[in-house]
Structure formats: C-alpha cells, structure tokens
Image: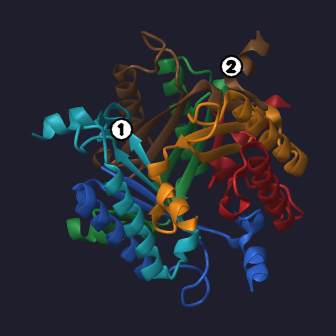
Chain colours: A cyan, B orange, C red, D blue, E brown, F green
Amino acid sequence: MPYVNIKITKEGGPDGSGATAEQKAELIAGVTKLLSDTLQKDPATTFVVIDEVPLDSWGIAGKPVTEYRARKN
Amino acid sequence: MPYVNIKITKEGGPDGSGATAEQKAELIAGVTKLLSDTLQKDPATTFVVIDEVPLDSWGIAGKPVTEYRARKN
Amino acid sequence: MPYVNIKITKEGGPDGSGATAEQKAELIAGVTKLLSDTLQKDPATTFVVIDEVPLDSWGIAGKPVTEYRARKN
Amino acid sequence: MPYVNIKITKEGGPDGSGATAEQKAELIAGVTKLLSDTLQKDPATTFVVIDEVPLDSWGIAGKPVTEYRARKN
Amino acid sequence: MPYVNIKITKEGGPDGSGATAEQKAELIAGVTKLLSDTLQKDPATTFVVIDEVPLDSWGIAGKPVTEYRARKN
Amino acid sequence: MPYVNIKITKEGGPDGSGATAEQKAELIAGVTKLLSDTLQKDPATTFVVIDEVPLDSWGIAGKPVTEYRARKN
C-alpha cells in the first residue's frame, strides 16, 4: 500500500497555470503501474498526491528557481 | 512533541470549497487529544497541519479520485 | 481518502525503544475514526503512517529535544 | 525540478528485509523517466527519496497492515 | 543532496498575503549555506521547498493558530 | 510556528554512520535562527526534524546516489 508524493513547480500547461488534469492522470497511472511492476504493490491501495509549488517557493543551488534558470542561460 | 500532517481531498463544506474552519478545529482538537491519551504527548508542543488537495491531484488505484469514484458507482 | 502522517519522538514503551505495537494500533484506529466522524471520510481508504524520530534528530526552540527538556527542569 | 517521495511498507526482498537495491534503482529510474516523458522535467534535477515503513507503523481501514491483511484472508 | 521543506503559516508580508519573494529567497539562501557550512553538502544539489499554510489549517496545543494566539494575549 | 524537515543522505560523521549529534544540533540552531531573523518566527514554537536516508534509497538524475557519484568521477 504505497503512498507517493510528487512535488513539481507550478508552471506549463495550456495557460501557464500548471500541469493539466490529463498530465496529472498520466503521472498517477504511471507511478502506480511502476510500483505494481517492480514490487507487486496492489494498485487498489496505492495513493498518489501531486503538489504544485509556486516558482518563488522552490529553491535550488541557494536561489529561487526563476533566478537559478536566468543564471544558467 | 508530535507533528501531525493530515492530507484530505478539497471538497465538501457549505459551498463545496472544502472543510470548514469548525471541522478543521475538530480535527486539530481530536488528534491532539488522541496523542495525549495514548502516548502522554504534551498538547502544548503538538503541531497539526491540514493540507487540502485538489481532486485531480489525488490518485488511487491508478486513477484520479473523480474518475475512481465514477467507476465505483 | 485521507493520508495522515504522525511524527513522534522515539522513546517510551516497555524498554525505552519507542511506542508499542498496541499504542500504534490505537493511534491508527483513533485518527481513522476521527476523520470518519468529522468529515465522513471512508476508513477503507484512510492511510496512517507513523514515523518515530530519534531524540537528537528533533529540535524545538533551537535545541535538540534532550537539551530542551534538561533546561526546562 | 521535481521531488518524489515514495513510501512503502518494509517487507519482501530476498530475506524479508525490504526492497533490494536493484528494486529501488528501478523505482528511481522509472519515476524519473515518467516525469521527463510526461512533463519534460529535467532528470538532472529530479530527486527521489524512498522511505520503508515498518508494518506496524502503517495503518489502513483503521488497523495496522498485518491485522488488515489477516482479516482479508 | 539535501531536501529541505519549510512550512510556515501564511501571514505577514506587505499586504498580509504571506512571505515576500525576497524573504523566501533569504530562507533558500540561508538554509542552503547552513547545510554547506555544517555538513559540506553541495549547494548545486540542495532543494528547498517552502509551503505556506492557511492559519485555520495549522493547530497547536489543540487549537487553530488564531484561537491559540487570542488566548495567549 | 514553523515546521522544518531536513532530509540528508546518511553518511559522513566519525565512523561513517551519519551526521553527529553536534552537527544535528548546529542545523537545528541555525535554521531556527534563520526563521527568527528573516520572518520573526518565534523559536519557542519552531520544530525541526532531521531525516537521514540510506544512500540506496536516494535517487538523482535517475540513479541511486552511489551510482550517480561514481559516474561523475
């Protein structure tokens, strides 16, 4: 009975407002299948929770994501 | 000094916008009392954080919650 | 379909090695009932995960728990 | 830059002591590829953390996993 | 490659709508430096995620934060 | 009343068994001070929980940490 929490930055999608319902459904189906294939975990008791995090609330390399990307380019 | 994180789907409530402040207060009071009764944890240093998750960001049995419920009915 | 994560310090129990299986079962039963009573959440799809944290890995008021308690006494 | 946390019960594997290093590597590779395929997330900045939880610390349907399974059979 | 999750109540800031982007950037820079200074963790692979939690979803001492503060004054 | 969760790989320390109690105390003191300095959060109600994760349970770039490091060298 796995529990999977996926945290992603809130961006992309048709109007820039984040992952679409279809993309989230793909993530849910994909990770549930992965746990079933790899560890024989029962899909019926597999939970997946997706959290979308605002760009200025996510940091990497000591900087918010937006600043991090600007420096890389 | 326990820390409790409760994740629920965002639904219900008077206008469908999620748990009411009263319901959240009941959860906070109830789980704090449970930890005090069962393990003598001091309520003064018990934290409870409630996260409400959009329905299309929660998956079970490989499907988003809304699709999962539609199939069960 | 709630997911509840309870973090407690690893201590107490018959030999100081943490909560007993009975105490964990009481927490699981209690919080599942609370979510059912308060928000009509279905127990069949309620997950509870209990994490026990070593005392020196938990901090409060800027100090590890053991030091915090020593100062309070 | 996704962060994925996978929580599974600690069981199975060659000596009952949990998922093998190979199985964990498969989970890590699979979920990273899934995020890259679905949302074009860069694998270089995708983290996966796997937590294995003792059976008596995981509850479902108001009971610890071991009791839950015994009742189902 | 540390992962740090900071949960704070959503309040303060210029218009009461929470921490500013500048304050979040300070938290990200500060905790990344702390992990580098203390444990020689590489900033390039240090993630920080900040979650802001509505006041009525955070409990302490068995009460929502707003009620807790009102009683203390 | 912040809650901070720091996840690090379990390694280093005098005998390779992870961060020392002193290093954990430094992390706890440092992040509590950071939240007090940046957002005026009260140290008395700041929790810090440090999780140490086995190397084969942490993935980056689609590989377990040990394999990831071997390839970089």
Residue most extreme to the bottom: D14
Left-right relation of C66 to A17: right
Is label 1 or label 2 in front? 2
Q: In the orientation shown, which residue stands out farthest toward the left?
A: A73
**What amino acid is at disc 1?**
Trp
* Residue shown at 53% from the left, 35% from the top: E7
**Residue A58 tag number:** 1
SS state under label 2 = helix
Q: Residue at x 45, y 50 (%)?
A: B57
Which secondary structure lies at badge 1?
A: strand
Q: Is residue D16 left or right of residue E33?
A: right
Q: Is residue F31 above or below residue E12?
A: below
- Whether residue C17 is situated above or below residue E49 in the rendered picture: below
Residue sitting nearer the eye, C26 or F46: C26
Choose between F72 and C30: the one closer to the eye: C30
Amino acid type, callout 2: Thr
Say which mark, if any, is on residue E66: 2
Residue F71 appearing in the image:
yes
Circle 1 packing at 10 Å, graded few (<14), some (14-19), many (20+), is many
Residue F40 placement, left or right of B29: left
